[in-house]
Amino acid sequence: MARYRGPVEKIERRFGVSLNLKGERRLAGKSALDKRPYAPGQHGQRRKKPSEYGLQLNEKQKAKFMYGLSEKQMQAVFAEAKRRAGNTGTNLVTLLEQRLDNVVYRMGFATTRRFARQLVNHGHVIVDGQRVDIPSFRVKPGQKVEIHEKSKKNVQVVRALELTNQTGLAPWVDIDAEKVFGIFTRLPERDEVVIPVEERLIVELYSK
């Protein structure tokens, strides 16, 4: 299935949680979910209790939408998480957080992962001195991620830095907002990654 490109606020209302899909509106408290905290459609306010499979599917879908992955990409990340030693769910979250587009977002250079992915796709992001245009590129601890010199004054990047500096950044990244670069200092601990996803249910779904 192709990556979703429709109205993102409908997705958040469907699941009833913020997936950080809308940048400035979310940070300003003006998202559709804040105004209408129920599912879209005529019967949106009459939620049915989902089955066990439905719960597992919802968690997988939330993770896909949040990180901007297609089903094929999600399956590939899960397969890698399963191959690694340790807890598969924790490995899954760690691998998702290491994606370059997510790291750009976590460093506050973009208000959404979607815009961060655009920055990467269009060649505006440099890793250790080399331009990287692959959003799924896996950033390793100690690597330097920066916005290309010609893009540092991009209005959306500047605005993102203004907004995200007010809300705090992930503790596993250090940034220089003035020079628009950051260091991915270490892999995050699971309890540090605050996301509305129960990865245990995703593992159960894919393990069937």
Image (cartoon, rainbow, N blue to C red):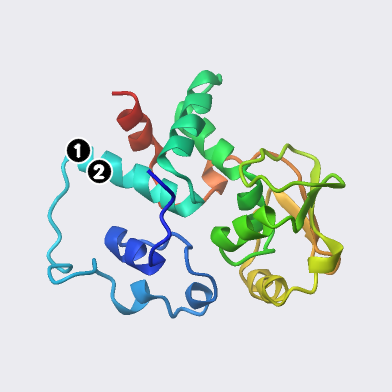
Q: Which of 14 and 120 is in front in this view?
A: 120
Q: Quadrant of residue 1?
A: top left
Task: Give the residue pinned by disc 2.
Answer: 55
Q: Write the residue at 68% across / 54% down.
A: 120
The amino acid type, in three-letter code, at marker 1 is Glu
Secondary element at tag 2:
helix
Q: In which quarter of the image is residue 52?
A: top left
Q: Residues within 10 Å of mark 2 (few under 14, many from 20)?
A: some
Q: Position of residue 32 (x, y in %)?
A: 36, 75
Helix, strand or loop for disc 1: helix
**Could you say which disc has been placed on residue 164 in the image?**
none
Question: Type of residue at label 2?
Answer: Leu
Q: Residues within 10 Å of mark 1 (few under 14, many from 20)?
A: few
At x 31%, y 66%, the residue is 13
From the image, tell me which residue sits under label 1.
Answer: 52
Q: Position of residue 192 (x, y in %)?
A: 57, 47
Q: Are marks 2 and 1 in contact (CB under 8 Å)?
A: yes
Q: In this view, does 168 lie above or below 170?
A: below
Q: In this view, does 201 lie to the left or right of 178?
A: left
Q: Quadrant of residue 12?
A: bottom left
Q: Where is residue 63 in the image (x, y as percent from the top left)?
A: 43, 47
The answer to whether 76 appears left or right of 198 in the picture is right
